[in-house]
Amino acid sequence: MKTLLLICITSIYIFANDIELSGSVISDNEKVITSRNMGFIKDVYVSEGSFVKKGQILYEIDSSSIDSQKQEAILNTKMLENQLSNIQINYNRFKRLYKQDLVPKYDLEQLELNLINTKNMISIAKAKLKEVNFQYNYLKIKAPNDGLIIKKSIKAGEMAMPSSPALILTDLSSLKIKTDISESNLNKIEINQEVNVLIPSINLKTIGKIEAIIPNINAVTHSFILKISFDKKDSRVYPGMYSKLLIKPLN
């Protein structure tokens, strides 16, 4: 009887020394989706809670603004090309006249300089047209990776502003558990240490490990942040889920 009592007391003592923490599931790869171009939103193809694949179109911006820039660039290029054609004709004529000593060399050199400058301007205009055409690639905003849309801040018909958050995409393949641990317990843990993980809402019991120990920006709390990776097995785990953690302290 005394032996059994001693075993129970010892077990209770060991369990009491375990570090019990609570945490939340987070994604270690959460992206804020924005557009590079300003313009009216033509269509939004996802909603909050939508699962998306890498490369899938999330929303599309109307092309009217770029269409006008393209027409202007095309017109400018054609005008310069027509101008070059006329200069080339004059240059060839002056070249023949110069050989006959009927025009001064200065006039020929001026036409030659004008010819070179116009060719350079055409190269710049064509580069501008190429740049405008490339902007069409940014009108269809695509998912950078597989994930879940957890926030949508845009609607069709609204104005998309560069760098203004439109969607938040969270990667469900990069889930971690984030928790706080007191400074007094830091000497009882280490990187790669095993952690018993329980997510009560889905009754998931699994093993995790400490991946990072990060100083808390709030110095008043005297606590540190732990990031814990874990095996979610075949369970559907989402950011925000509550978790319980049990860490056996180092000897």
Image (spheres, helix red, strand yellow):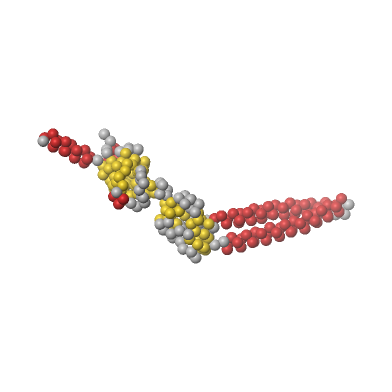
| Residue drawn at 79 percent across, 51 percent down | 109
Percent across and percent down for residue 112 are 77, 52
Percent across and percent down for residue 240 are 34, 52
Q: Residue furthest bottom?
A: 157
Task: Give the camera-side residue of 222 and 145.
Answer: 145
Q: Is residue 120 left or right of residue 203?
A: right
Q: Is residue 60 left or right of residue 216?
A: right
| Residue drawn at 40 percent across, 57 percent down | 49
Q: Is residue 13 left or right of residue 52?
A: left
Q: With respect to residue 64, does 239 lie above or below?
A: above
Residue 175 visible to an observer of this rendering: yes
Residue 221 visible to an observer of this rendering: no
Q: Residue furthest right?
A: 100
**Quadrant holding the C terminus:** top left
Percent across and percent down for residue 198 are 29, 46
| Residue drawn at 35 percent across, 48 percent down | 235
Q: Residue furthest left?
A: 1
Q: Is residue 194 left or right of residue 58?
A: left
**Quadrant holding the N terminus:** top left
| Residue drawn at 36 percent across, 46 percent down | 234
Percent across and percent down for residue 193 are 32, 38
> Residue 232 lies in what quarter of the image?
top left
The number of numbered badges drawn on the structure is 0
Task: Give the camera-side residue of 238 and 178.
Answer: 238
> Residue 250 lies in what quarter of the image?
top left
